[in-house]
Amino acid sequence: MSQRSALVLGASGLIGQELLQLLLDNRSYSHVTVLVRKALPVEHEKLRQLEIDFAELEKYEKDFAVDDVYCCLGTTMKKAKTKSKFIKVDYEFPLKAAKCAEANRCQNFLTVTAIGADLRSPFFYSKVKGQVEEDIASLYIRSTHFFRPSLLLGKRDEFRLFEKVGEYTLKSCSFCLIGKWKKYRPIKAYNVAKAMMKAAMEDKVGVHIHESQDIFTGECYYSFTNGKKVIAK
């Protein structure tokens, strides 16, 4: 079995933590590097941790010479406090990471955006997510995957009141969310992480968009081949 190497950005987050554990447990991966602001309390023979300043991400371009780059960076407006800081974390850093991956000709670049990501959206959050998808998709990367999860379920290090209220409400009425509303069902961070690793292992060329309901079921996702949108089973 050929050995793979991976680089993870955002390994301290809800999805990133789940993803890191999956990669360390997967025998197909021999080396896993994480770029973090502060070292994680994780030790493993496969793991290499680099404490960095993400504003200087370009300095670590050589570390993107891996098979798969997983980007799980993201924040909230409440935590960022300003639009400019939000843009830095959710747009500038992921785009820099994608450009580093492009420069090193990595096989797969996989990143988390959000449900409703749309460059033409009147909502700031969704518009930024749509813009980063648009700009990353324009790069010359063999395989690019965008994951658009709904409200994430999982154990967080910090308590977020409004997210807890939303989580409880959506979980309570999930059975009502069918048809076009199915994508709004809450989804476990573990399921997103698992879907990301599975997509990387499949090595499918092109740009792929994984909507929340498709991440949950694992049945299909949208792909773009030569600019044409198709549904792949």
Image (cartoon, helix red, strand yellow):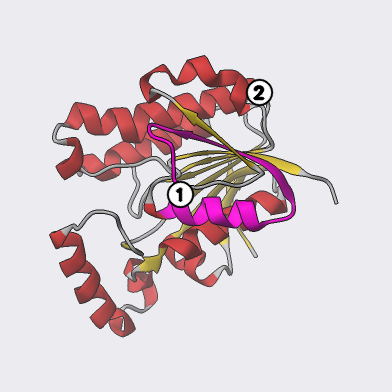
Which SS class for mark 1?
helix
Residue 26 spot, x, y in % from top left: 68, 56
Residue 199 spot, x, y in % from top left: 63, 54
Q: Nearer the viewer, residue 55 or 42?
A: 42
Disc number for residue 104: 2
**Residue at x-position 47% and y-position 63%:** 190
Residue 137 seen anywhere in this rendered image of the structure: yes
Q: Please check the rendered image and state whether residue 141 is part of the magenta-colored stretch, yes or no.
A: no
**Residue at x-position 53% and y-position 20%:** 60
Residue 122 spot, x, y in % from top left: 20, 43
**Residue at x-position 43% and y-position 54%:** 15
How would you rate the neighbour count of disc 2 (Cα within 10 Å): few for under 14, some for 14-19, many for 20 or more? Answer: some
Which SS class for mark 2?
loop
Q: Which tag, 1 or 2, sits closer to the chain's start?
A: 1
Q: Are marks 1 and 2 in contact (CB under 8 Å)?
A: no
Which image quadrant is residue 87 in?
top left
Disc number for residue 43: none
Please give left or right for residue 52 compared with residue 105 in the image.
left
Which quadrant is home to the C terminus? bottom right
Range shown magenta: 15-41
Q: Is residue 57 above or below residue 232?
A: above
Instruction: Look at discs 1 and 2 and give the one toward the viewer.
Output: 1
Please give left or right for residue 164 compared with residue 110 in the image.
left
Which residue lies under the disc numbered 1?
A: 16
How would you rate the neighbour count of disc 1 (Cα within 10 Å): few for under 14, some for 14-19, many for 20 or more? Answer: many
Amino acid type for the residue under numbered disc 1: Gly
